[in-house]
Image (spheres, helix red, strand yellow):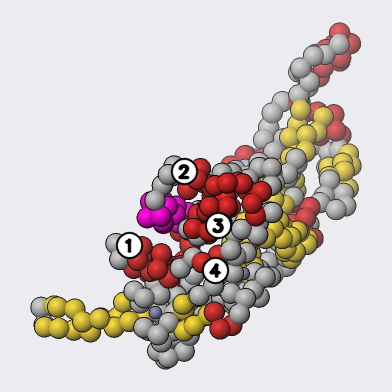
Amino acid sequence: MANKRDYYEVLGVSRNASADEIKAAYKKITLEWHPYKHVNDTEEKKKEAEEKFKEASEAYSVLSDPDKKAKYDKFGHSAFDGTAGADFSNINFEDLFGGAFGGGFGGFGDFINSMFGGGGRSSSGSREKVYRGRDIRTRVRLTLEEIAKGVEKEVSIERYEPCPDCAGKGAKEASDIQKCPHCNGTGVETIKRQSFFGTIPVQTTCSHCNGTGRVIKNPCRNCGGTGIVRKRVSVKVNIPAGVENGMQLTVQGAGHTGQWGGQKADLLVLVEEIPHKYFLRDGKDLFYTHTLSVTDAMLGCEVTIPGLDTSFKVNVEPGTQSGTIARLKGHGLPGLRNYTGSGNGDLYVKFLVWIPRKLSKSEKQALEEMRGSDSFTPNPNRDDRELFEKMKTNF
Ligand SMILES: [Zn+2]
Ligand SMILES: [Zn+2]
């Protein structure tokens, strides 16, 4: 307990603070740091909120109890031998949150609903609400080689899981969890509202339970009564062959668990393609540029083209022009049904002819002799001219 902060410091009050001041300080912190309020935040912020909330709750559980407060004032943290002093049973959460969130903070109930998936609310009006957790978004970076074959990847995520201490219920004893009597557990109440047409009934978030549908008497100290705790886990994601940059894969049920034994949401995985050293990609097709020497282009040769798993031998005809494109049918990427279609794409190879920048004296001499020769005089045919017009932007 060496790093434990002073309870007064945690709540930001002086040692002479009155009970009301302590209560007000705790209320202020919970309003700011209650995990419900940070569900949409970054993972870091969520963690911070959870810790601040727990720390403040522990401090308040001691400082709001006159007996414990006296012990703490005398002996500090050592008065409680670890965390024994942090008993949440004396905190009236209903009183604290009910007043704070239901009164001057009216939108909070709706906020909880939207965050924990208010869509799960039963329409029958008498059944208790079921909370769905939130989806988690993450990304995987894949090489073209991995994309060509498909791959299983592990991603590390932090998610809300059912609290092991209370089995996701929010309290140890089942009797501590009661259906909100005000709304009969639905989280919704009907109020009468004045309108242009007279008094009309309007459905709104239950002000008694803030739309949660329940009243928890002795919240579980591990999860603060929410029934969920954060945990870092590793999730296996099956990546089918042929996925593309920007695609999103869904791992059903791998997202956050909803509070109070709620439903598990999904993990959404964004695919990021790592640019390849040699290949450019357009859907299922791959593009590769191979540079020939002048002599190989003139005399013809056999070249080796790297593939994603095996390489290919390609015959270069004598007299191959710079810009010639060879199509290796079926040697592109596999198609992905519903996206790029079935069947494999093609591998396109463009040949560029490299002109030497420096020549030896004898090379120069030999070439000088050929300069005037008929076969060296440019005489492009129709195919050669079209070649340059057909050049794809992918190269
Ligand atoms: Zn718990
Ligand atoms: Zn209620």
Amino acid type, residue under disc 2 in the picture: Arg
Residue receiving disc 2: 15
Q: How far apart are marks 3 and 1 (CA)?
A: 31 Å
321 up-or-down from 4: above or below: above
Residue receiving disc 3: 68
Residue receiving disc 4: 89
Pointer 4: residues within 10 angstroms few (<14), some, or many (20+)? few
Looking at the image, is mark 4 or mark 3 earlier in the sequence? 3
Q: How far apart are marks 4 and 1 (CA)?
A: 25 Å
Residue receiving disc 1: 105
**Residue 21 x %, y %:** 38, 51
Q: How far apart are marks 4 and 3 (CA)?
A: 13 Å
Does the beta carbon of the residue at mark 4 sit less than 8 Å from ligand 1?
no
**Residue 272 x %, y %:** 65, 51
- Contact? badges 4 and 3 (CB < 8 Å): no
Q: How far apart are marks 2 and 4 (CA)?
A: 23 Å
Amino acid type, residue under disc 1 in the picture: Phe
* Residue at position x 10%, y 78% in the image: 196
| Residue 147, visible in the rendered structure | yes
Looking at the image, is mark 2 or mark 3 earlier in the sequence? 2
Disc 2 vs disc 1: which is toward the camera? 2
Amino acid type, residue under disc 3 in the picture: Lys
